[in-house]
Image: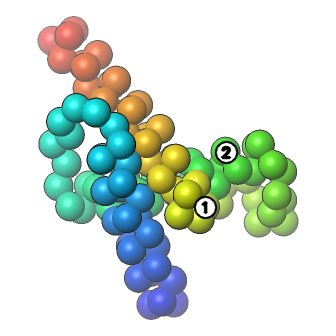
């Protein structure tokens, strides 16, 4: 159980940091928020992998992805977050 938690945190940190490097612009995210971004990205990547490839149907449609899927999902999550922040500040 501890190994699973550590793996999720490490993959989340890597995916979150890589996503922040790939997405242009400044992101005011703490280390914890970056790890959370990577973890959310992992589930987005797992969901997209399931939709695109139909793999691992026994595990359900909402599952964690590998590192590549996690990075792709984290980029998507970060772009959505940036879009929502711009939209929120333009209406204020």
Query: What's the CA distance linking mark 1 and mark 2?
Result: 9 Å
Which residue is drawn at the image coordinates 67% and 45% (left, top)? 48
Q: In front here: 14 or 32? A: 14
The dot on residue 48 is 2
- Element assignment for label 2: helix
Q: Quadrant of the C terminus?
A: top left
The dot on residue 65 is 1
Which residue is drawn at the image coordinates 25% and 20% (left, top)? 86
Q: In front here: 24 or 60? A: 24
Q: Residues within 10 Å of mark 1 (few under 14, many from 20)?
A: many
Image side of residue 59 versus residue 80, left or right? right
- Residue 20 position within the rendered picture, expressed as x and y whole percent measured from the top left: 30, 47
Residue at the bottom extreme of this rendering: 2
Residue at the top extreme of this rendering: 91
- Residue 6 position within the rendered picture, expressed as x and y whole percent measured from the top left: 41, 82
Q: Are marks 1 and 2 in contact (CB under 8 Å)?
A: yes
* Residue 65 vertical placement versus 4 (above, below): above
Mark closer to the chain start, 1 or 2: 2
Image side of residue 56 versus residue 15, left or right? right
């Amino acid at each position: 159980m501890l190994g699973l938690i550590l793996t999720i945190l490490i993959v989340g940190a890597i995916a979150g940091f890589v996503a922040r490097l790939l997405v242009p612009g400044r992101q005011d995210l703490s280390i914890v928020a970056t790890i959370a971004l990577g973890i959310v990205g992992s589930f987005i990547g797992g969901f997209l992998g399931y939709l695109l490839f139909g793999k691992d149907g026994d595990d359900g449609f909402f599952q964690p992805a590998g590192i590549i899927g996690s990075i792709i999902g984290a980029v998507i999550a970060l772009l959505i977050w940036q879009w929502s922040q711009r939209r929120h500040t333009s209406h204020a």
